[in-house]
Amino acid sequence: MTNMPIRGDLMPPISDSQKESGKVREDDGSFGKILKDKVKEINKLQLDANSAIAKVELGDSGSIHEAVIAMEKASISFKTMLQVRNKILEAYQEVMRMQV
């Protein structure tokens, strides 16, 4: 069994050659980036639903069925995002209540 030090971070160390060559890549799968992408996706669904509603109102070849489906997609996505946010806040508050 080797005695390796316990590290607090999960990222591999950056070598000197990576620093010099500038080939240090950002973590593309970070939680923050994923969350930001999902919020943008939900916003796009909301905008699509608003567009579908406007098409129906103006009579621009918009189908009521398509508008209702777009509204439901946006609604379900938004409700899901709120539940995820609530779980994240609960987890954060639980960690903050822990005694060291």
Image: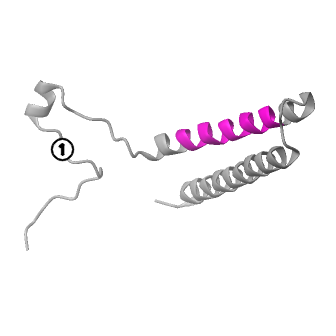
Question: Which secondary structure dominates the residues rendered in magenta?
Answer: helix
* Magenta stretch: includes residue 95: no
**How many numbered marks, from 0 up?**
1
User: Whole-percent x and y of residue 88?
Assistant: 60, 54
Q: Is residue 46 above or below residue 2?
A: above
Q: Residue at x 39, y 46 (%)?
A: 29
Answer left or right for 8 relative to 71. Answer: left
Q: Which residue is mark 1?
A: 13
In depth, the one of 88 and 65 nearer the eye is 65
Quadrant for residue 42, please give it: top right
In depth, the one of 27 and 89 nearer the eye is 27
User: Whole-percent x and y of residue 43?
Assistant: 67, 37
Quadrant for residue 45, please give it: top right
Badge 1 marks a residue whose secondary structure is loop
Three-letter amino acid code at the position of disc 1: Pro
In depth, the one of 46 and 14 nearer the eye is 46
Answer left or right for 72 relative to 89. Answer: right
* Magenta stretch: includes residue 37: yes
Q: How is the image coloured?
A: one colour
Q: Residue at x 90, y 27 (%)?
A: 58
Crowding at dot 1, Cα within 10 Å, few <14 / some 14-19 / many 20+, comes out as few
Q: Quadrant of the N terminus?
A: bottom left
Q: Residue at x 80, y 36 (%)?
A: 52
User: Whole-percent x and y of residue 77?
Assistant: 69, 51
Answer left or right for 58 relative to 41. Answer: right
User: Whole-percent x and y of residue 26?
Assistant: 31, 36
Q: Which residues are magenta?
A: 36-52
In depth, the one of 59 and 46 nearer the eye is 59
Which residue is outermost to the front? 61
